[in-house]
Amino acid sequence: MTPPSSSITNMKRIFAGLGLCMTVWVTGMQLILTDSAKIDRGEIRDIDTKLQINRTPEPTTTPRPRTVPTTGLQRTTGPIRQREPKTVIERGHEPIKVPTLAQEPTSERVLVIYAYAEIDDWRHSIRKSNLQFFVDFAIGGKHHNKSDVDYVIVVNGYTCTVDIPEQDNTFVIARRNYGYDACAWKAALDYMRKRKGPAWYKYFVFLNSSVKGPFIPAYANDKHWTTYFTKYLNNYVKLVGTSICCSKVYPVHIQTMFLVTSFSGLALIEDMLKCHEHKQTVIVNIEIGVSQFLLKNGFNIASVMKQWEDHDFRDKDRTEEMCRTHNKDMDGDQYYQNAYYDGIDISPFEVIFFKNNRGVNQKVHDVYSSMIREWGEKYSPNKPTGYIGKYSKNYILL
């Protein structure tokens, strides 16, 4: 009996489908085996060698014989290769292989470096007021006795008329005024590394005196202010800031008056913290360069602003769409009046450290600054017993 033509057609389709599946499976296995061999030989490198990938070196000694217990025979095997551990993260539909970096310290110690200079210009009083606020409510304040945070005030130009409290975790480094903020931050890093050891700190905070803070609401003031930034850092996010610039001229980047990174993040970007003579080279090489370097090498950056919550800045199309839709004015710089999300102003409590030298949201800033100062006078438990002078053990002259 001859099968119906429809049954023959269906059987042909089934066998054709099975043949296609086998072809795809064989091709896939060939690609996997080829890539595995290339990874073992070190031919596949997904990121710059300057990121200091940890590869297990090939043994140089003669391998030991290995016994096969089921037969009692001995066989000599070649060296057992340990593949480099990798973590795959997603960027849209494209997987990114992230290398394993140097192991981070087990402690949670934080180093905070504050770049300061007293220059006789119209911003002098703002800078001085901001440093005083930082001393009173960042170094002092409710969590002043947190022992795993060290503070370094870098005084560029040797002059500082703000009293810095003398305590074990606070240092003053005086140096000549040159090279801009990154140069001062690097000088402090080098000194503290010699003093404390290369792996003493897990997190690093860099800021300058153009911002005032911390502004912490009462319901969130049960933790040290640094934790609201360090919590963003992980295997993928290597840099955190307060605000994002959506410039139409330059690529999207974190504004560098306030930056936070981790031990492994610092290993990636420290070579970029150099001294520069001109502000424009600072903008290109540090403010824009650091963010873009991380993004181009498969890492993410983060901001505490609500607009950028859970955002992946490696998704360039989505980032540009967000900027184009919500940050159209003032060339995407959100520290101008009505230049934040859909024309509102940034709140000090959203960014924690607020840039206050442009008159943005001035009344809100002034009132809350007074409110925090009044709280400090009544309830702050920290009353300094002495101040760092030129003969103090924590005063360093470079």
Image (cartoon, grey):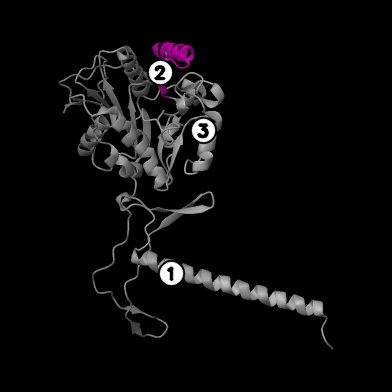
Q: Residues within 10 Å of mark 2 (few under 14, many from 20)?
A: many
C-alpha separation, residue under disc 3 versus residue under disc 2: 23 Å
Tell me if residue 339 can be seen.
Answer: yes
Residue depth check, mark 3 versus mark 2: number of the one nearer the observer: 3
The label shown at residue 107 is none
Question: For residue 265, which quarter of the picture?
Answer: top left
Q: Say whether marks 3 and 2 touch (CB < 8 Å).
A: no
**For mark 3, what is the residue?**
323
Q: Amino acid at mark 1?
A: Thr
Q: Residue furthest right?
A: 1
**Residues tagged 1 and 3 counted as in contact (Cβ below 8 A):** no
Q: Which residue is mark 2?
A: 356
- Identify the residue at the far front of this view: 249
The label on residue 34 is 1
- Which residue extends farthest bottom? 1
As measured in the structure, the alpha-carbon distance from the residue carrying label 1 to the one carrying label 3 is 42 Å
Magenta-drawn stretch, dominant element (helix, strand or loop): helix
Q: Where residue 113 sits: x, y (%)?
A: 30, 29
User: What's the distance in space between the residues labelled 2 and 1, CA to CA?
Assistant: 57 Å
